[in-house]
Image: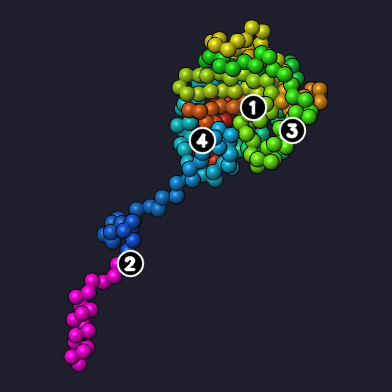
Amino acid sequence: MLLVLLAAAVLALTPLPSFVSPDLPPPDADDAAPELPPPPPPRHQEDLVLGAGPLPPQSVVDPEAVLRRLDFLASPLEGARISMPDSHLPGAPREYRQGWHQGIDYYAGHSGIPIVWGQTPVLAAGPGEVVRADLDFVELTVAEREALLAECVRLQTTPASALDRLHGRQVWIMHPGGVLTRYSHLAGLAEGLREGQTVERGQLLGWVGNSGTAAAARGSREGAHLHFEIHLDGAPFWVGLSLDDLRTVLRELLDP
Ligand SMILES: [Zn+2]
């Protein structure tokens, strides 16, 4: 009996072991607080620039805020609709180069306007300064292009330098507010276009082409399309948007 009383006294004096993690709120915290989704995994800046990783199922940035920052832009092709097949949109896999699509493709048959190699005008999506104009572009040979793609497969990613070559003849425009637009696969540039030049929205930059593609390397004009990118603060604008919100933002921004 004495032993039992002693044991009871010891138990009473011993603090209860704590099973509560110090990270958890105290028991009297607001139990009704909603559970927040886990934050998205951090991504390396280079991954962002190369458009690595699929689009998140739900937006982790506010699509309205993105729209407000980009609402001065207009379509780079007069009267064209955004092409809605997933493969034409940012975030689509590009297995042939072990990477992801980081722009919007405008193809004939999907955009509501004729898109013809060397004839369809490409226009500045907004006012800004030309920061890149490939005046001396030289097309890849078939062998050079195949070597680039083999390197992508070997590295299991698309290095920035390879992606740049695969985009063919390009123009880039820096707009106010940290917005950059890029126009790729061009057949040619508008006469007199130069880096450092100021352009207005709707000003002619060049013509749709297929430079940088397999067809162009073969000397063909097949597959002409405009690859158009919008970057915000140095990364593709769609990073953090779901596919649904991306479609909504693109339609509101760029559709006629
Ligand atoms: Zn593209």
Q: Which residue is tagged 4? A: 45
Question: SS class of the residue under badge 4?
Answer: helix
Give how far apart the Cα atoms at labels 3 and 2 are. Answer: 59 Å
Q: Earlier in the sequence, mark 1 or mark 4?
A: 4
- The type of residue carrying mark 2 is Phe
Name the residue furthest top. Answer: 192
Q: Which mark is residue 17?
A: none
User: Mark 2 touching mark 4, by CB under 8 A?
Assistant: no
Q: Which mark is residue 19?
A: 2
Residue at position x 50%, y 19% from top?
Answer: 175
Residue at position x 72%, y 19% from top?
Answer: 138
Q: Which residue is tagged 3? A: 147
Quadrant where the N terminus sits is bottom left
Q: Nearer the viewer, mark 3 or mark 4?
A: 3
Q: Earlier in the sequence, mark 3 or mark 2?
A: 2
From the viewer's perspective, is residue 25 above or below residue 234? below
Q: Which mark is residue 164?
A: 1
